[in-house]
Amino acid sequence: MDPHSVADFLLDVDDFIDPSIRELYPENMLVFFEVGEGSYLTLDLDQEEENGICPVYYFEKKIAVSLEEFLKKMDEELDYYIHA
């Protein structure tokens, strides 16, 4: 998702997303990557470390310890998180 879309999702601007889907993503989960219609990858802000590193989740499943690790894994296999 581009930064504008992330902001629209968080601020509920321009009817970006169905309100029933929004309920699946609590405020502590920062939506940043759209997997498909209605499913997103999130950063868990409640687990943020001192240096700003947050784990990445696909629904309730932790798929990376950081955004950096997520990007490295994506570079190796584009949809690794679906098969993990």
Image: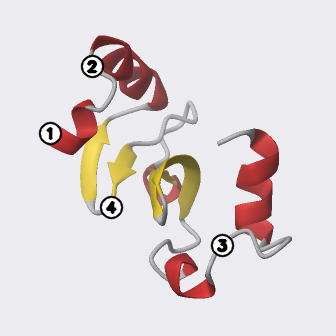
Element under label 2? loop
Q: Which residue is mark 2?
A: 77
Question: Which residue is located at x 48 percent, y 66 percent?
Answer: 38
Q: Count residues near mark 4 (Cα–Cα under 10 Å), then give few for <14, some for 14-19, many for 20+.
A: few
Question: Which residue is located at x 25 percent, y 39 percent?
Answer: 81
For the residues labelled 4 and 3, say whether their Cβ atoms are less than 8 Å apart.
no
The amino acid type of the residue labelled 1 equals: His
For the residues labelled 4 and 2, say whether their Cβ atoms are less than 8 Å apart.
no
For the residues labelled 2 and 1, say whether their Cβ atoms are less than 8 Å apart.
yes
Separation of disc 4 and disc 1 at Cα?
13 Å
**Mark earlier in primary sequence (4, 2):** 4
The residue mark sitting in front, 4 or 1, is 1
- Label drawn at residue 83: 1
Element under label 1? helix
The residue mark sitting in front, 4 or 3, is 3
From the top left corner, tell me how far across and down residue 14 is, in percent. 85, 71
Seen in the picture, residue 65 relative to 43 is either above or below; the reply is: above
Separation of disc 4 and disc 2 at Cα?
19 Å
Separation of disc 2 and disc 1 at Cα?
10 Å
**Mark earlier in primary sequence (1, 3):** 3
Q: Count residues near mark 1 (Cα–Cα under 10 Å), then give few for <14, some for 14-19, many for 20+.
A: few
